[in-house]
Amino acid sequence: MRVLVIEDEPKMAQLLRRGLTEEGYAVDVAADGLDGFGAAVSRGYDAIVLDVMLPGISGFEVCGRLRRDGVWVPVLMLTARGAVVDRIHGLDGGADDYLTKPFHLDELFARIRALIRRGPVERPIVLTVGDLRVDTAAHRCWRGDTEIVLTSKEYALLEMFARQPGTVLTREVLMEHCWDFAYESRSNVVDVHIRALRDKIDRPFGLASVETVRGAGYRLRAGGDRNKSSTT
């Protein structure tokens, strides 16, 4: 098993190299973000240990670039103690797990073993359906080059559709995933929000990508054909 450590602090890098080598891993070390990214895309690794604070480009940017380039090797991100924002940023950006400094080596080894058992699993950050793009980390969306501002419920519906383009989702499924259990259901609440979503992502662009499937529910047309009826 080969592990890449991207860490600029020499003592920490040496500690990780020695510990992982003693655990039986082949270990490569990169001292800055650009070198780490280059190594990660050019060689096959079973896991990457990635520090957040790096010269060149940050650990966040390294991880984001890897995911955008289709490199899904498991990433364990090292963050400063108490840096909750960093941990959230890292996980939303494609990291698989995080560990706060200082940490015990045995815990790091256990987390790496768990990530390697899981293996590389493709988890796209940006969902693309036709010319519609949904950034699941930033909760933003675009039609072509035009960014579209959505409410939280409109975004939740759109992400549901974008994760399953072409699949019919019933009103009950949409209610279950986009509204909490305490919400007092109204029979037309889904329809109202779907109408508002269409008003933003379809009608200004002459599209009808959100389709009503009579008697069943709604689906997002993968191609987003222009000037089509929104019912089938």
Image (spheres, rainbow, N blue to C red):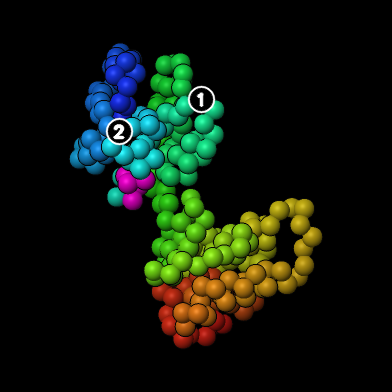
Residue 200 image point, x, y percent: 54, 73
Figure disc tally: 2
Q: Is residue 29 left or right of residue 92?
A: left
Residue at image position (32%, 44%) is 66
Residue 40 occupies quadrant? top left
2 or 1: tag closer to the N-terminus: 2
Q: Nearer the viewer, residue 67 or 83?
A: 83
Q: Identify whether 21 is placed above or below 4.
A: above
* Magenta stretch: includes residue 65: yes
Residue at image position (53%, 60%) is 159
* Magenta stretch: includes residue 35: no
Residue 99 image point, x, y percent: 46, 27
Q: Is residue 208 left or right of residue 218?
A: left
Is the magenta region chiefly helix, strand or loop?
helix
Q: Which residue is mark 1?
A: 81
- Quadrant (top left/top right/bottom left/bottom right) for the N terminus: top left
Q: Amino acid at mark 1?
A: Arg
Residue 75 image point, x, y percent: 38, 35
**Residue 72 appearing in the image:** no
Q: Nearer the viewer, residue 215 or 42?
A: 42
Q: Secondary structure at mark 2?
A: loop
Residue at image position (58%, 59%) is 156
Residue 213 image point, x, y percent: 58, 77
Q: Which residue is mark 2?
A: 55
Residue at image position (39%, 33%) is 52
- Binning the other alpha carbons within 10 Å of mark 2 as few (below 14), some (14 to 19) or many (20 upward) gives some
Q: CA distance from mark 2 to mark 1?
A: 20 Å
Q: Amino acid at mark 2?
A: Pro
Q: Is residue 195 left or right of residue 44?
A: right
Residue 153 occupies quadrant? bottom right
Please identify, in this view, whether the residue under mark 2 or under mark 1 is nearer the observer: 2
| Magenta extent | 64-68
